[in-house]
Amino acid sequence: MVSLRSISAVLVLLTSNAFGQANPTVAEVIAKAHNAALKEPTSADKFKGVRMEIKTVDVEQKPLGFTTLELVAPQSRREIDYTPDFFVETITASNGLEGWTSRHQLRAGGRAENKIIQFQQVARLKDVTISDLNFYSAPEAKQGSVNLIGTADIDGKKVYSVEYKYNSGYSVTRHFDTKSYELVATDQIMPDGKTQRQVVKELFWVDGLSFTKREEVYIDGKKIAESTYDKVTLNPTVSESSFAFPIR
């Protein structure tokens, strides 16, 4: 006769085979995802920020826009967006305490407009930046929480899905490969309630750190764009004035 203990052992074995390990905790998944993004455990020790360029095209490969993104630890962020014809430049910047946006036309006599970002949005940008810079680590307890919401199949890969929630209201779900623990996709709920999914198609390494090279963007399951990340510079020199409101 099979004992209850033997049956339990079989169930544990089946669970282990199904998930790659026996019931991983969210802490274990995040730790492995963090390590998978580093060539060596110390690769991120001197990481203080990053600058990168992003080119986005539609499903027909027509340009949608160009972006330069600058992140400086612990919480400064500047995003410079251009229209496909480089006619309009929009800058959004925050140092975690205050924020602003500037939009102007790149021609002689073109219109310009500067606005202050409200406190709640500054708090959200702060958490987005912290999250982007920590290579998938969980937020500190006073900042937010994480939750392992289960497994799924995305782009032909089985993934662990981890939801990150911050007190500012920022929320993002990251999907990690159950074997390699590399990032497979990222989900966010848009203001209109639709789900934006960014599916990673290619990763690359810069000084021992893993970054997305190419991704596909979907809205509620429909592909709308592709983005390519290029010219990645670690620890760029960015002055504090770059994040200060341009007009006092």
Image: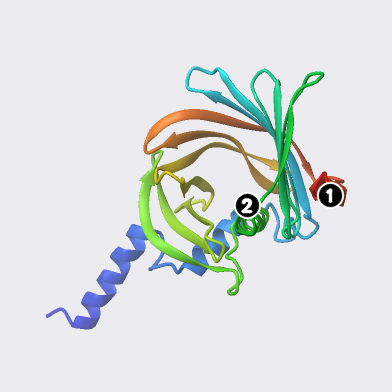
Alpha carbons under labels 1 and 2: distance apart: 41 Å
Residue in the picture at 84% in, 49% down: 248
Q: How is the image coloured?
A: rainbow
| Residue 108 percent across, percent down from the top left | 82, 18
Q: Identify which residue, 121 or 150, lies in the foreground.
A: 121
| Residue 1 percent across, percent down from the top left | 11, 80
* Left or right of 196 in this view: 236: right
Residue in the picture at 23% in, 78% down: 6
Judging from the image, what secondary structure is the residue with disc 1 in? loop
Say which amino acid is labelled 2.
Ala
Seen in the picture, residue 150 relative to 103 is either above or below; the reply is below
Instruction: Give the residue at mark 2.
Output: 37
> In which quadrant of the rendered view does residue 167 lie?
bottom right
The answer to whether residue 245 shows anywhere in this view is: yes
| Residue 139 percent across, percent down from the top left | 59, 66
> In which quadrant of the rendered view does residue 246 lie?
top right
Of pointers 1 and 2, the one earlier in the residue sequence: 2
**Tags 1 and 2 touching, CB below 8 Å:** no
Say which amino acid is labelled 1.
Arg
Residue 106's mark? none
Q: Count neighbours of disc 1 (C-alpha within 10 A) and say few if under 14, some if 14 to 19, many if 20 or more.
A: few
Residue 248's mark? 1
Furthest residue to the left?
Answer: 1
